[in-house]
Image (spheres, rainbow, N blue to C red):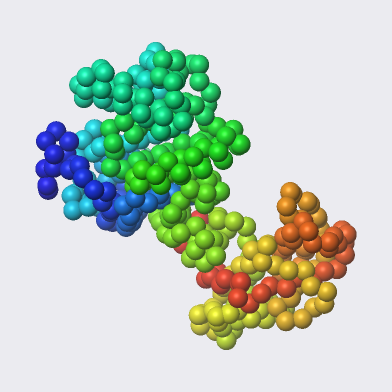
Amino acid sequence: MTSGEPGRGVPAGDAADLRLWDVRKTFPGGTAAVENVDLRFPAGELTALLGPSGCGKTTLLRMIAGLESPSFGRIHLGETDITDVPAHKRRFGMVFQNFALFPHLTVAENVAYSLAIEGVAKPKRRARAEALLDLVQLPGYGDRRIGELSGGQRQRVAIARALAQEPQVFLLDEPMSALDAKLREEMQVELRLLQQRLGITTIVVTHDQREAMTMADRIVVMSRGRAEQVGPPQEVYQRPANRFVAGFIGKANFLTGTAEGGAVALPSGPRLTVAPAANFRDGAPVQAACRPEWTHLVPEAGANTLTGRVAFVRDIGQVREIHVETPHGAQVCELPFSNPARPALGDEVHLFLPPELIRVFPAQDRADAA
Ligand code: ATP
């Protein structure tokens, strides 16, 4: 292993890709929190680790940070194997859910805390803290106490503190979870702009798909300790790799059927044409998925339509959701609010599923299996 800069463990220099090679973590007692994860976090990009509670996001982030040792596998930063480098020598900045600021120190002292530990002289620390507070849009706040700040301001102080050592990699675990919804959205945009300006390789753990889609260059969707799909937000949304991802990112209507000549035959019902043709052997049990906003109301039954009765209608801001009971299960159709259609409860309606927007998956994925 390269020893790097004395006392640092990891060489400073240009941003480098972070690589995980078959990383696994089994806790004493046998919980397999992370299994066979191979990932590349490209230099300068923001990657979101997204998944439901308990899927292993935090454990993976803690292994990257050096706070937890992998049971198996290696972690590389550029050419350097950092698997066994202790956390304090990794030069990774970290922001946690609760920010963990020191209430007895001023804002500037919090920001410059790691520099004080390193023995950097006080005037230099102060100058660095002020520059960082400018960066996170808190100019002149250095002498305040933490208790005098709002939630959003505290979060910015935590970010400034994590950036004080010019980290090579920036790690954030649910950094917005303590903020209210509006501030959360503002901070997501602010954090993204800051990250782009600094060009720092960043990994954000979140269970909030909107947060991941707002901020990330790439999303890693996790389930049950594994990475189910890795890709840019739009790719993951438009082309989910499996049923779990289709249901977790955005909403989806699922229809159970069997593959038939590249189409999906619904039991004693219509045959849904899929374009391009679904690649399954005939007779294989499959699930077809179509998003509510891709499902259209049409005046008559025809190819690729399902007929049912309106069970529920609700207006939510820009869209109107129409819930339809069909012989193949409940389906939801989402119309832009500008669309005048407003069928009444109990009306018979026809839903068209565009062939090019139907995704087909095996009837059961590993991620679904209980
Ligand atoms: P959340 O979104 O709820 O924080 P997460 O995706 O971050 O969840 P982890 O905290 O990584 O999930 O936990 C993954 C699994 O590992 C869970 O089953 C959890 O109970 C288990 N786990 C986490 N830490 C430990 C530990 N120190 N000892 C034993 N099991 C643990």
Residue 288 in which image quadrant: bottom right
Q: Is residue 328 above or below residue 160?
A: below
Foreground pick, 236 / 129: 129
Q: Is residue 16 above or below residue 236?
A: above
Which quadrant contains ligand 1?
A: top left
Decide if residue 167 is on the left or right side of residue 349: left
Residue 233 appears at what percent x and percent y?
A: 49, 57
Residue closest to the far bottom:
261
Residue 172 appears at what percent x and percent y?
A: 40, 39
Residue closest to the far top:
104
- Residue drawn at the location 77% of the way across and 63% of the way down: 325
Q: How many marks?
A: 0
Foreground pick, 152 / 77: 152
Residue 138 appears at what percent x and percent y?
A: 46, 26
Q: Is residue 367 visible?
A: no
Q: Is residue 210 visible?
A: yes
- Residue drawn at the location 49% of the way across and 16% of the way down: 147
- Residue drawn at the location 52% of the way across and 71% of the way down: 362
Q: Is residue 369 above or below residue 266?
A: above
Q: Is residue 256 above or below residue 164?
A: below
- Residue drawn at the location 46% of the way across and 59% of the way down: 232
Residue 287 appears at what percent x and percent y?
A: 59, 70
Foreground pick, 243 / 199: 199
Residue 27 in which image quadrant: top left
Residue 363 in which image quadrant: bottom right
Decide if residue 352 is on the left or right side of residue 137: right
